Image (cartoon, rainbow, N blue to C red):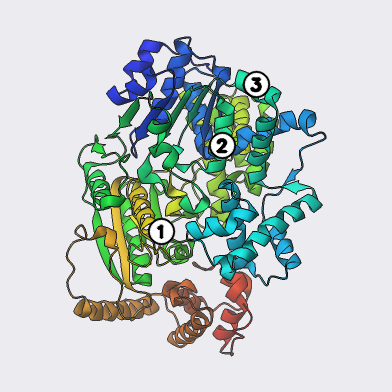
Amino acid sequence: MTTPAPPDADALLAALDEDQRAVAEQLTGPVCVLAGAGTGKTRAITYRIAHGVAAGVYNPTTVLAVTFTARAAGEMRSRLRDLGVGGVQARTFHAAALRQLSYFWPTTIGGNVPRIMEHKAPLIGEAAGRLGMSVDRLAIRDLAAEVEWAKVSLITPDDYARASARSGREGVAGFDATTIARLLSVYEDVKTDRHVIDFEDVLLLMVGILAERDDVADTVRRQYRHFVVDEFQDVSPLQHRLLSLWLGDRKELCVVGDAAQTIYSFTGATSRYLTTFSRSYPEAPVIHLVRDYRSTPQVVSLANAVLARAGRHRSASTVELQAQRPSGPAAAYTAYDDDQAEATGVAAQARRLIDSGVPASEIAVLYRTNAQSEGFEQALSAAGIGYLVRGGERFFSRKEVKDAVVLLRGAARSQADVPLPDAVRDVLTGAGWAPEPPAARGAVRERWESLNALVQLADDLHASRGAQLPDLVAELLERASAQHAPTVDGVTLASLHAAKGLEWDAVFLVGVSDGLLPISMAETDEAIAEERRLLYVGITRAREHLHLSYARARNVGGRGTRRHSRFLDGLWPVEHTPTPQRRRSRAGRADALAAALTDNDADPEVFERLRAWRAATAQQIDKPAFTVLHDSTLVAIAAAQPTQLRQLALLRGIGPTKLEAYGPQILAVVRGEEPDLAAH
């Protein structure tokens, strides 16, 4: 692989705008950077590090850059390598702390670091059982989140009742504060009995060692002399305590953040360390990054307008963005009749974008709660559009990816002279990759998407670095350890929280109605202010195309009582009375359905039986009917009239989950028998 030339200080500075250059030139701390969305903050801080190395101010091995996701840390390392800077440690707080804990544990505690429990649920369940608490899966999930909040907020069981009252967190999972305080204590006992620790313990233990062992603290401070912390608005009290111990009495600290993107308060994150940085370090320059290179003026204008309406709840540290891109299409606003119509309409608009040349991987559908995804998954499937749900199975945990990495490692020993794109295609063709995607959906398409992502990564590395097969294998191993997945082709479905830090050419913000955004559980002024920031984060994910929508009613034919989000008051176009349009819309859907039955030679009687079964099933599980099966899928079943599960599995809209949940019932309905509704 071609090694990038060492960085030239003047060339680095020349590549930056005036504000970014101010960041890169401020090589000694403390420094505070208030960076708006899309303003190139990662570029500014990576160039700052590279400039410091080029100027001889930094030894790269003594720089620790801390961020909040493995993906962001991996991207930072990659950018630094491209600038000719190696050796800088770019890690998450947890990864950096775990590395130090593993190194110092044998000499400070003795033996090996206890096993880290990836999931708290079993331990929470056991602790609840010891206390005689009646808990189900959802209660355990909520209690696990509360344990995490207490630990990252440095709240002990004795302090929990007072702290939870101050934070408005009473009644978690239906339990009083005294009971949860006891759970916190017993949870720690369970971990001790099982000789395990959790992720928060990694930070807590390292804090304890650094605070109690001056020799360890001195060793760490000799190793790391310059610190950069990205996303500083998301720091928790525990992380801030660890950072303070890393620093000691030094001030070589550059922090970067955006108070307008503080959306994780429920996890213990707080923007107060960012907003009060000048109070802690009066000598620190505060540099504002306001030039937005990501989004069009239309997107930027809406984002600024949403924040401007925050009134007294708008932080003084918030920046007003200045769009740098050429003008683009206006933001689109659509009020649909019901949830099904919204999902179908968004899928149709996504199809038009794809047909116009926007790659599917550059389109995202963002929603407030994960429960909203199913309807959009169904609609995209019915429209023949591939998708991936962010937050699903990790890329490098997929069997086809693990198998492919093994094959590539083997080939790296024998194909060193073959150009990387050709070598990877040769290897992965034997693993099931083909130049064109398969017509089949579901698992077959997902496997191809995974392998194609590896092909695309190989092309990118070869083009940018002249990489060969051994270099790709090394990159994949590093990415696997950091869970830094390559791009997978397909429309992204993600919650607004999961979308932070990402961007797409086109974004659909769906369900932007009061009750969802802000969510009904947000009752305090602070909670509602955070919901506004969540909308701001969603808007600023879009580079060019932005569509905002909501459904007036939940179910088809339901009473339209919903209204657009209060955050869009004065921004959402004036709506007219929808009743006549709704009647015509329902009549139009009926005509379209009749045409579909005729065009597909489907049996109308079988279709009506299937529709009656679907209605009963939807009522039983208390979900909209379209989330069970879409009309187009019912038409396909009524046309094919399958007699076996394998025949049913071939039909559009029937994936493995649907097949397992409803397959036998559907076959019974097709046969004209009474299905067993309890059998799903």
Quarter holding residue 433: top right
| Tag 2 and tag 1, C-beta contact below 8 Å | no
Considering every residue shown, the one lying at the far top of the view is 56
Instruction: Pinpoint residue 591: horizontal percent, then vertical percent.
Output: 30, 80
Category of crowding for the residue at label 2, using alpha-carbon neighbours closer than 10 angstroms: few (below 14), some (14–19), many (at least 20): some
Residue at 65% over, 41% down:
204
Name the secondary structure under disc 3: helix
Depth check: 452 or 310 in front? Answer: 310
The residue at which mark 1 appears reads as: 367
Q: Which mark is residue 241?
A: 2
Residue located 34% across and 37% down the image: 38
- The secondary element bearing badge 2 is classed as helix
Q: Is residue 371 left or right of residue 506?
A: right
C-alpha gap between disc 3 and disc 1 = 47 Å
Amino acid type at image mark 2 = Arg
Q: Which residue is mark 3?
A: 218
302 shown above or below 74? below
Rendered residue at 80%/36% (across/down) = 112
Q: Quadrant of the N terminus?
A: top right
Q: Nearer the viewer, residue 612 or 73?
A: 73
Q: Find the residue positioned furthest to the right.
A: 111
| Marks 3 and 1, the one that precedes in the sequence | 3
* Mark 3 vs mark 2, CA separation in Å: 16 Å
Residue 380 higher or lower than 288, as above or below = below
Numbered badge on residue 146:
none
Q: Is residue 482 visible?
A: yes
Rendering coords of residue 421 (x, y %): 53, 30
Q: How many marks?
A: 3
Q: Secondary structure at mark 1?
A: strand
Compared across the picture, whether 119 is left or right of 628 comes to right
The x and y percentages for residue 553 are: 33, 75
- The crowd level at tag 3 (other Cα within 10 Å; few <14, some 14-19, many 20+) is few
